[in-house]
Image (spheres, rainbow, N blue to C red):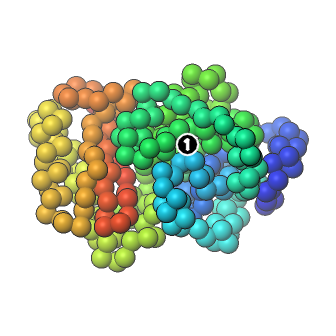
Amino acid sequence: MKIYTDINDFVEARSKISSKVALIPTMGSLHEGHVSLIKEAKNYADLLIASLFINPKQFDSSSDFSNYPRNIKNDLEIFSKNGIDIVFAPEKSDIYPENFTSIVKIENLNEILEGSFRKGHMDGVSTIVLKLLNLSKPDYAFFGEKDFQQLKLIERMIIDLSIKTEIIPVKTVRNKNGLALSSRNSLLSKEEVILAEEIYKSLLLGIDTYKNGIYDSNQIIKNIENYLLKFPEIKIEYVSIRDKYDFIELKHIDRSFALLIAVYINEVRLIDNMICDLK
Ligand code: PAF
């Protein structure tokens, strides 16, 4: 496994590769969710590039950025053990040199939900992902469905900006009690992990409500909110029901949808979602 921190060296190395290339963009602090991205990438490409860059532009507060878990030694071991060929771990000052002023805005998707609660977050994501795609020119890039709005935003950007990379979504990986794996889970105490597992249960409740014949989104959302109200340590930011494909808010469910949630477990912010496919 080769590790590049210098952008020019990386670009030069990439230019010499003629086989199919997959990119797995990460911010490190890897877990089984990232491993599943890598495993999926192996089904598509001969050469796997993983990027490791904690993107400051997608954090809406400096404390969230500085508290974001970091474990580079462990990350490199996981990359190496799982067959990554190249790690691209650039310096912040090389990605965003002095006078960097560009922002990629994917309108309609950048200011709702995640973008509304975390100002500038979605713009930070689209900006760094476009940059990573430009530098690594992958045939395929892999993103987890856990960050569903991020996935929709990137899919839109690929179409709108005629980018020649195919985006491959990968299913959310959960712990045995349903908690979606996330780097932020490492910030939870044991008791908070048990509380966080209620997020999954609340989503299941939402899907069950729908399956029992309630198609009114407000009623489903109310059910979820009432369920989570029992846990004072859980503070809901949003629960939303959106079209699975174009991410339009659904008041009445008549097509495949994503049920999305963001909560705080005490100080730790977590997001999750469940997709329901209608035949
Ligand atoms: O999902 C993530 O880990 C990040 O948002 C990404 C896609 C690596 C961009 O920084």
Residue in view at x 53 percent, y 48 percent: 58
Up the image or down, 30 lies above or below 167; here it is below
Which one is in front, 50 or 187? 187
Up the image or down, 1 lies above or below 220; here it is below
| Side of 178 where 140 appears, left or right | right
Residue closest to the far bottom? 190
- Amino acid carrying label 1: it is Val
Residue in view at x 59 percent, y 28 percent: 158
Q: Quadrant of residue 124?
A: top right
Residue highlighted by disc 1: 125
Q: Which quadrant of the figure contains the C terminus?
A: top left
Q: Quadrant of residue 191?
A: bottom left
| Side of 56 where 175 appears, left or right | left
Q: Secondary structure at mark 1?
A: helix
How many numbered marks, from 0 up? 1
Q: Which quadrant of the figure contains the N terminus?
A: bottom right
Residue 40 appears in the figure: no
Up the image or down, 152 lies above or below 37; here it is above
Residue in view at x 61 percent, y 38 percent: 127
Which one is in front, 176 or 193? 193
Residue closest to the far front? 99
Residue in view at x 39 percent, y 71 percent: 188
Looking at the picture, how far across and down is residue 83, in whole percent?
A: 70, 59
Some atom of ligand 1 lies within 8 Å of the CB belonging to the residue at label 1: yes
Looking at the picture, how far across and down is residue 5, in whole percent?
A: 79, 57
| Side of 209 where 125 appears, left or right | right
Is the residue marked by circle 1 packed among few (<14), some (14-19), or many (20+) residues within 10 Å? Answer: many
Residue 247 appears in the figure: yes
Looking at the picture, how far across and down is residue 170, in whole percent?
A: 50, 45
